[in-house]
Image (tube, rainbow, N blue to C red):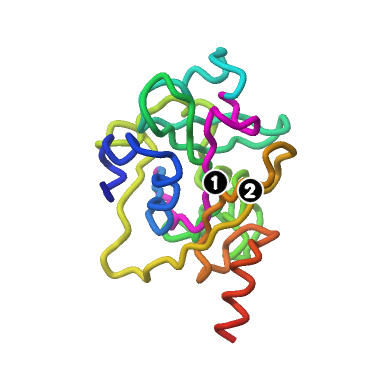
Amino acid sequence: MNDPRRRSFYERSVHAVARDLVGCTIRHGDTSGRIVEVESYHQEEPACHAYNGLTPRTEVLFGPPGHAYVYRSYGIHALLNAVAEEEGLGAAVLIRALEPIDGVDLMRLRRRMDRVDDLCSGPGKLTQALGIGLDLNGTPITDGRGPIEFLPRPADSRPPEVVLGERIGITRAVDLPWRFCDATSTSVSRPRPPAMRASARRAA
């Protein structure tokens, strides 16, 4: 169940998928990053695009799990999601932040900035850094069949310290604690969850 290269990884509760993706790697072309923040969305709540049913925009959300749902936010940013749960049910995990691993110079060029911690510290930032656009909507992310690869946590990587918080950047269902962050990472987007700030104080 812990291998995001397999479709079975995504055929589960979207919240379980979200938690298990923290610490995994996303690769696109010559760039890659470690997932340090995600949010889960489910058709049962109004912040999810699937809440109002099947439309041309949400077709991928209701399709088979293990595919990329890429949409434009505020007319500017392309946001990357991993479709989860069973086909016909709208649910996905939004990838909110990454720690850059490979292709950092290319990420800097695309983002026109140098600070590594900020290259992928937001859902629009990471797609720009990795060169992921709307043309990749609906492409598979399993079994190496698509241009975006979701890879397992490296055996020698530090284990994530997953903390939960309320989702950000939305106006509906804001009370649901469906944001999953790695408390050990400086690349998590702001504002950071209260649990993460508390963990940082304990470490200090």
Where is residue 181 shown, x and y percent of the image?
53, 59
Say what amino acid the circle numbered 2 marks: Arg
Q: Secondary structure at mark 2?
A: loop
What residue does disc 1 label? 39
First in residue order: circle 2 vs circle 1: 1
Say what amino acid the circle numbered 1 marks: Glu
Where is residue 29 shown, x and y percent of the image?
39, 43
Task: State the image quarter where residue 9 is shown.
Answer: top left
- The residue located at (49%, 40%) in the rendering is 93
Q: Secondary structure at mark 1?
A: strand
Task: State the image quarter where residue 204 is shown.
Answer: bottom right
- The residue located at (48%, 59%) in the rendering is 100
What's the magenta region? Answer: 29-50
In the rendered structure, does residue 43 fall within the stretch colored magenta?
A: yes
Mark identifier at residue 167: 2
Where is residue 70 shown, x and y percent of the image?
53, 31
